[in-house]
């Protein structure tokens, strides 16, 4: 990562890359959310969005 990035441990870099992959974004794009909300909250949100998208794709939703 560029020099202007905060210093992250190797474990945090891997965690950021995994999170970015799950969100379909770049690590740079996800870093903004991680810095604002923390890893745990960002991972929770990405997980919730993915579950919602899976429900839509599987037809487990209905219109109101």
Image (cartoon, rainbow, N blue to C red):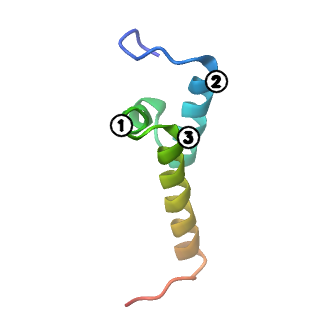
Report the disc number at residue 23. Answer: none
Spatial CA distance of label 2 from label 3 is 12 Å
Label 3 secondary element? helix
Q: Nearer the viewer, mark 2 or mark 3?
A: 2
Spatial CA distance of label 2 from label 1 is 19 Å
Relative horizontal placement of residue 19, taking residue 36 as reference (left or right): right
Q: Is residue 17 visible?
A: yes
In the picture of the structure, the residue carrying the numbered disc 3 is 19
Relative vertical location of residue 63 with respect to residue 10 in this rendering, above or below: below
In the picture of the structure, the residue carrying the numbered disc 2 is 11
Label 2 crowd bin: few (<14), some (14–19), many (20+), radius 10 Å: few
Label 2 secondary element? helix
Label 1 crowd bin: few (<14), some (14–19), many (20+), radius 10 Å: few
Q: Quadrant of residue 12?
A: top right
The numbered mark, 2 or 3, whose residue comes first in the sequence reads 2
Residue at 57 percent across and 82 percent down: it is 59
Relative vertical location of residue 60 with respect to residue 9 in this rendering, above or below: below
Counting labels gives 3
């Amino acid at each position: 990562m560029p020099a202007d990035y905060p210093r992250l441990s190797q474990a945090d870099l891997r965690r950021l890359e995994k999170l970015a992959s799950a969100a379909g974004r770049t690590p740079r794009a996800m870093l903004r959310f991680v810095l604002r909300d923390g890893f745990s909250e960002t991972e929770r949100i990405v997980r919730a969005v993915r579950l919602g998208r899976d429900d839509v794709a599987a037809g487990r939703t209905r219109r109101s």
